[in-house]
Image: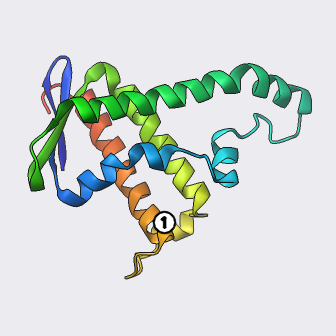
Amino acid sequence: MRARRLDEDTLEISGIGFLEGAILWRLAAAADPHGSAAAEERLASSLTGGAEPGLDEEWKEHVLPELKALFASAVEIVRMDLVGSWLGPGSDAAVRVPVAHVEAWLIALNQARLALAARHKLTEKAMTRRPPDNLRPRTLARLFVDFFGGLQQLLLEAGEDPAR
């Protein structure tokens, strides 16, 4: 999989194989924290971790609703980009991403990584171990977290270098 800048306004992620495509199409579901108290807490954690209840309450009342709206908007932008610009079936699909949407992609990918890690209790140590040869939900979550992190890196690199 690779990302390159097609022109001033567009990036293309190409070489998307069947497995990568299946994971990418699950981004919105992966980013959704509902049904997991750990994921909801991770995405809506308090500002001071309880050290300053007044400040935490202000954060919860004034900032958190906007943050949740930003997260939802970012996931929807990615979903619409996937639906609207998916190119080619099979083992070498591609998706076109407007440069103006790259920040939304980075937000959505990060949200999915945080939600999955919290939902499946993935620690730094667990992320550095060799993957087991089973496909339990926690193993698949680790695969998704790694994939979304790699895609974030590709988008950042392609967005920085117009010649790429």
Q: Is residue 13 visible?
A: no
Residue 143 horizontal/vertical position (percent): 39, 63
Per the image, label 1 sits on a secondary structure element best described as helix
Q: Quadrant of residue 101?
A: top left
Q: Nearer the viewer, residue 151 or 28?
A: 28
Location of residue 54 with respect to 148 vertically, above or below: above
Question: What type is the residue that disc 1 sits on?
Answer: Met
**Residue depicted at x 40% and y 81%:** 134
Q: Is residue 154 left or right of residue 109?
A: left
- Mark 1, residue position: 127
Q: Nearer the viewer, residue 122 or 93?
A: 93
Residue 130 horizontal/vertical position (percent): 41, 76
Q: Is residue 111 left or right of residue 96?
A: right
Q: Is residue 105 left or right of residue 158?
A: right
Residue 72 horizontal/vertical position (percent): 51, 30
Location of residue 75 with respect to 153 vertically, above or below: above
Q: Nearer the viewer, residue 42 or 80?
A: 80
Q: How is the image coloured?
A: rainbow
**Residue depicted at x 17% and y 45%:** 2
**Residue depicted at x 63% and y 52%:** 35
Residue 155 horizontal/vertical position (percent): 29, 36
Mark 1 crowd level (few <14, some 14–19, many ≥20, 10 Å Cα) = some
